[in-house]
Amino acid sequence: MEWLQKHWSNVVTLGCIVIAALIEAWQQAAANASASIHIPRLQGVWNYVPLLLLVTAGIVWLATRRNEANQSQIQVSQPPEVTAGIPTLSSLLGQKPNITFDAKQFFALAYYSPITAEVEKNIKNIAQQNYPNDKESFYARFIGVGLVAYQHDVTWFTIYGSQLAAMTELNSRGLIPIADLKKYYDKAVIDYPKAYSNYSFDQWLGFMRDRMIIATYPTQMVELSFGGKDFLKYLAHAGRDVHVKTN
C-alpha cells in the first residue's frame, strides 16, 4: 500500500498507456480480421478513448514531475532557519528577529581593496566546491560563525580579569545585586592601581553592558545575558585560559 501511494502517478500513467494500446490493438485486429473470424469493432466514443487515455497519462506525468521539481527547488532555495539541533535565540525567546541593517549605507561607507575582491572570489569558489546546490546556506553559516567568533574575540582581548571573575559569579548565582560585583572592581583597584586610575566602576560595568555580556535592570540587579553565557561557552570551546587576564 505504501509503495502504491508513493508511485501512484507511474501506475496511472502506465495503466493509461497499456489500456490505450490494448484498445488500439483490438481495433486493428477487428479491422484486419478475415470474414470467418468475428471480432466486434468498437464504435462511437470508443474511437476517442485511446486519445483521452494518452492525454490523461501525459497530464499526470507532467503534474507529478512539476510537483517534484517545486519541492526540490523549495528545499534548495529556502534553507532551514535553524541549524539542526540548535534553535535560534529569537525562537527561544518567542520573538521575531529585529533586523535594522542598512545594506546600502554599509556598502556606501565600506572600505574596498584588491584584498576584499580576492576574499570575495575565494569565498565564492569555496561555496561552489562545498555547497554547489545551496550556496545561500553556506554564506549564511560562514558569516554567522565568523561574526559571532569575531565579537567574542574582541570581548576577550579587551576584557579585564576582574570582569571575568565577576562573570563567573554571575554564571553560578544568576540574578544578583549590582553592588555584589563591586568587590571585584575594588580588589582590582588595589592590585592594579595604575590600570584603574582613570577607570571608574560605572565604566567597568558599562564595558560589560556595552559588549552585551550582562543585562542590568532599573532595580539595580544584574545577570549574565544570553551573549555573556555564549561568550563563556566560546572561551571553553576555543581553549582560552582565563587566568592570563590578571588585571
Image (spheres, grey):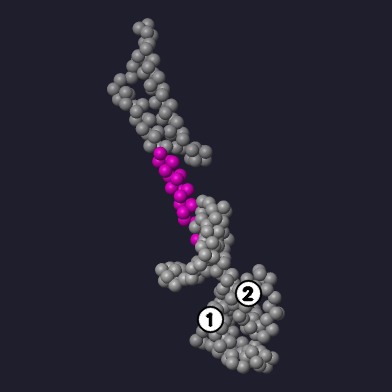
Which of 74/2 is in front? Answer: 74
**Residue 231, located in which quarter of the rendered image?**
bottom right
**Residue 115, located in which quarter of the rendered image?**
bottom right
Predominant secondary structure, magenta span: helix
Residue occupying the far top of the picture? 36
| 166 vs 132: above or below | below
Few, some or many residues within 10 Å of mark 2 (<14, 14–19, 20+): many
Does the segment drawn in magenta span residue 218? Answer: no
- The x and y percentages for residue 51 are 34, 28
| Residue 18 numbered tag | none
What's the residue type where badge 1 is placed? Answer: Asp
**Residue 103, located in which quarter of the rendered image?**
bottom left
Where the C terminus falls, by quadrant? bottom right
Can I make out residue 82 in this image?
Answer: no
- The x and y percentages for residue 18 are 43, 26
Does the segment drawn in magenta span residue 66? Answer: yes
Disc 2 target residue: 232
Q: In the image, which residues are magenta?
A: 62-82
Q: Are marks 2 and 1 in contact (CB under 8 Å)?
A: no
- Which residue corresponds to the image point at 57% horizontal and 67% vertical from the top-left? 146
Which of 145/3 is in front? Answer: 145
Disc 1 target residue: 210
Can I make out residue 239 in this image?
Answer: yes
**Disc 2/disc 1 C-alpha distance (Å):** 16 Å
Which of 25/138 is in front? Answer: 138
- Which residue corresponds to the image point at 33% horizontal and 16% vertical from the top-left? 41
What's the residue type where badge 2 is placed? Answer: Leu
- The x and y percentages for residue 216 are 53, 83
